[in-house]
Amino acid sequence: MPLDKAMDITNNWREAVKGLFGDDDNKIPRAFYIPIGDMEALVDNYKKYKLSGVRAYFVLSNPQPPYTDEMRGILVPVTEEIGDDGKPYYKDLIIKAADPAAKHDDMSIYDLTRPCPVFCDKASPLY
């Protein structure tokens, strides 16, 4: 994708949600940082399920506007399945956690992201 297009669409996002965050530019969620080691561990833990990717869900701890808490993403491993109509779709793999460090009630849902603006590259043209 060209940089100018990426700048346009990231700006569209900021404009669309700024009112939800009290018009405070420092609170508008911009991106997530996901450590490569965490992604590799997620893939390794669920390798036997032949993952096709991961899905990131947007999450907020506080459901009331203005949203002042950090928006994050939770990650779920995903497999490619074939639907009844014969077309592929991507299914969340929500099972007991395969991570050896997981607690007994943990599922394959990971809060691995670090939010931006807190962990941002403020010099990026996409910021």
Image (cartoon, rainbow, N blue to C red):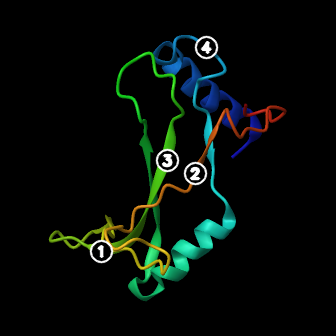
User: Which element carries disc 3, helix, strand or loop?
Assistant: strand
In space, the residues marked 1 and 3 are separated at their CA atoms by 23 Å
Check contact, mark 1 vs mark 2: CB within 8 A: no
* Tag 4 residue: 24
Q: Earlier in the sequence, mark 1 or mark 3?
A: 3
Camera-side mark, 1 or 4 = 4
In space, the residues marked 1 and 4 are separated at their CA atoms by 42 Å
Point out residue 70 in the picture as x, y percentages from the top left corner.
54, 33
Point out residue 96 in the picture as x, y percentages from the top left corner.
32, 74
Q: Residue at x 66, y 28 (%)?
A: 8
Q: Residues within 10 Å of mark 2 (few under 14, many from 20)?
A: some
User: Which element carries disc 1, helix, strand or loop?
Assistant: strand
Q: Residues within 10 Å of mark 4 (few under 14, many from 20)?
A: few
Q: Earlier in the sequence, mark 1 or mark 2?
A: 1
Q: Residue at x 65, y 17 (%)?
A: 25
Q: In terms of depth relative to the viewer, which is nearer, 59 or 124?
A: 59
User: Which element carries disc 2, helix, strand or loop?
Assistant: loop
Q: Residue at x 60, y 23 (%)?
A: 27
Q: Which mark is residue 81?
A: 1
Point out residue 16 in the picture as x, y percentages from the top left corner.
50, 20
Check contact, mark 3 vs mark 2: CB within 8 A: yes
Q: Earlier in the sequence, mark 4 or mark 3?
A: 4
Q: Earlier in the sequence, mark 3 or mark 2?
A: 3
Q: Amino acid at mark 1?
A: Glu
Q: Amino acid at mark 2?
A: Thr
* Tag 2 residue: 113
Q: Earlier in the sequence, mark 1 or mark 4?
A: 4
Q: Amino acid at mark 4?
A: Asp
* Tag 3 residue: 73
Q: Residue at x 40, y 71 (%)?
A: 103
